[in-house]
Image: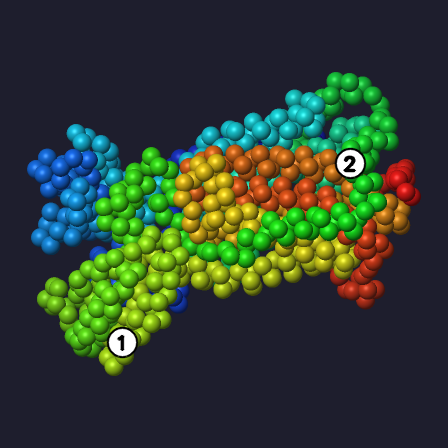
Amino acid sequence: MRSLARFSFRHRRLVLASWIGLLLVLGGAVGTVGAAYDDQFSLPQTESTEALELLQRVSPSAAGDQVTAVLHVEDGSVTDPAARARFTSALQAADAFDTVASVASPYAAGGEAQVSADGRTAFATITLAGRVPNDVTSAQVDQVLDAMDPGVRDGVQVEITGQAAQGPPAQGLAEVVGLAAAAIVLFVVFGSLLAMSLPLITAVLSIAVSISAISLLTQVFTIATFAPTLSVLLGLGVGIDYALFIVTRYRQGLLEGKSPEEATVTAVDTSGRAVLFAGITVCIALLGLFSLGLSFLYGVAVAASLAVAVTVAASLTLLPALLGFFGRRVLPNKLRDRPAADPQDLQQETRGWQRWAAVLDRRPALIGALGLVVMLVVAAPFLHLRLGLGDQGSGPADATTRQGYDLLAEGFGPGFNGPLLVVTDLGDSADTAATDRLRAALADDGDVAAVSPTVYLGGAQPGVAAPGGIGLTTVYPASAPQDEATSDLVSRVRTELVPAAEQGGEQRLLVGGTTAIGEDFSDTIADKLPLFVGVVVLLSFLLLIMVFRSLVVAAVAAAMNLLSAAAAFGIVVAVFQDGFGLSLLGVDRTGPILAFLPVILFAILFGLSMDYEVFLLSRIHEEWLHRGDNRQAVLHGLAATGRTITAAAAIMVMLFLAFVLGPDLTIKLFGFGLAAAVLLDALVVRSVLVPAIMLLLGRANWYLPAWLDRVLPQLSVEGPAEPESRPVLETAGV
């Protein structure tokens, strides 16, 4: 670490030029080959996937993704000549593309069911020519949508809805607001414009490199459309925090009288080690998503971990180079010419945090218990977490996908936005009795709004059941796709109605469609979440044992990581699922929590919690090694790191909350969840619970069996110890 820091400092022009050159090369490559973000995912060994594969095998053209074009008139009827001509023209324009397999028009024979009872709304189903959902690129979908010219003209409204019609999230304002808020906090912390700019420059340049690299990786990995925005959110947060830790240590070195080069080397060899350790743990946790066996998460894991890895690399190379350019100017004017600071400055112990340490020292059990109660209360809503997949019903009110969604719900019922697709495998016979029995049972079900006639495919004669063919029956629930009643309906159809209909026959009935896929995805995540959490917690436990040589410290840290995550999930459930204060975030509809959010959020929170845990515990451990007094080590460690941890947390919270300003629900969920988690982790867990528990446990904190100490490898995030004068922190009542 010292050699890397010294090289970066002395060859700062080369290092800076290398980073800029890397950005230009990657940017040029992206401009040449482009990016291919894709939300495709597969769910092996699930009923919805089996239904899709059967449909794909028998009728590939019917297995592609679909969008729904919705026509609406305020006055008159959609069958009036003017409205009919307008809609027919738009549908013909869409049908002209090679990427469109078929268009089911409400004006074609048998299309009467596609016109609402009041005659003011109609819809057409456009099936894209992909072999499977998401096989058609977003650019090709955009061509179709542009040709249809969605919008209002002469009193005729045409809107497009469906998953394929939803473009990638746009978050430009969020980054600007977040960076502005971070700049304000950094200026308050450092009191210097130059010092404030260092973390921002490092984070922005590393993120620019990361996004370019991620865009190129879309040619190799399937990376979701929200992945780059999530990577920006995560990269900016950790990038500014990592730079803050290193710059803070660098400024301390200058105040101790070190030269800029030696201060840089010391900062990278101490805080830089903690940054490297924290970054590695974040990447390991994110890449642990591969263990879930869900391909949809692979690209997200790679993109996010790449953003963190590049940020760490920038913090350890680009930042030391910038420190070489800035020198002592990172200090406020009044401190630049001082050869050394007083002990308070050297120790970074602010009076406010010294006072808080003294208060905590007097009543560790009471204050710790209050902090625990707060966290448990906040985490309580997590107990009724319901997972699902989002749809256009939660999108921005002015988006064409949301308006089309609302028009369908108003004209036909909420279930028309997420129908179930029952696929009948006819096998070696043409017997349709099982399908007929199921259709009759569904028609009598109070939670079903409508059941379409069964369409038979794969036979010699279109529309006629034949051996080796399939039947397609569309079922429209009476409730919206995200409603709990719809989830219950899917479960009941699969466990009760389908088995009853299949009894006595050879046909197999499979429930698929987008709503059923969402249910299967949620169930798969829910089944694998405990294992994933257990692996991540065990990993954190082992890493912390190796770093701090303590079973108790590692166990407490692992438990606190779990508590932080549970509290974050509790807040997300209370707001987005239960609706407390939801309108303040620009969302007007509650629903289940996105199924993939818990695993991704937990992986990120694990890494972010480790940031603060390592920063706090490394200082406490350092004090323990120098003093041999647990109480003094905890009090001095808290007093020395409290200001930096809360400043870093404030920056992260502001950055993450800025992303709530964007229109995309997925990014809102991540931004809000991460902001809540960081706030609670820094203010309650690291500032109250961890030090309170360590004060209560005393010397037991540092227990490690001798045999285990010999077996475990030695890891250090503190760098070589330097002898310093350590004052005793006096507290009331001592």
Residue 435 falls in which quadrant of the image?
Answer: bottom left
Q: Nearer the viewer, residue 337 or 394?
A: 394
- Amino acid type at mark 1: Glu
Q: CA distance from mark 2 to mark 1?
A: 69 Å
Residue in the image at 65% along x and 33% along y: 319
| Residue 461 numbered mark, or none | none
> Label 1 belongs to which residue?
502
Q: Which label's residue is closer to the chain start, 2 or 1?
A: 2
Are there few (<14), some (14-19), or many (20+) residues within 10 Å of tag 1?
some
Q: Is residue 242 left or right of residue 504?
A: right
Q: Is residue 286 visible?
A: no
Q: Residue at x 91, y 43 (%)?
A: 734
- Most extreme residue toward the bottom is 504
Name the foreground residue: 447 vs 15: 447
Above or below, comparing residue 555 to residue 280 in the picture: below
Q: Residue at x 81, y 27 (%)?
A: 255
Quadrant in the picture for residue 58: bottom left
The residue closer to the viewer here, 317 or 638, is 638
Q: For numbered disc 2, what is the local secondary structure? A: helix
Taking depth in this image into account, of 183 and 543 the one nearest to the observer is: 183
Residue 339 horizontal/vertical position (percent): 84, 23
Q: Residue at x 67, y 51 (%)?
A: 373
Q: Is residue 345 above or below residue 358?
A: above
- The residue that label 2 is drawn on is 353
Residue 19: x and y, percent?
Answer: 57, 33
**Mark 1 residue element:** helix
Image quarter (top left, top right, bottom left or bottom right) of the N terminus: top right
Residue 231 image position (x, y, % from top left): 51, 42
Q: Is residue 392 left or right of residue 545?
A: left
Q: Is residue 533 in sight in this rendering?
A: yes
Give coordinates of residue 583: x percent, y percent. 45, 38
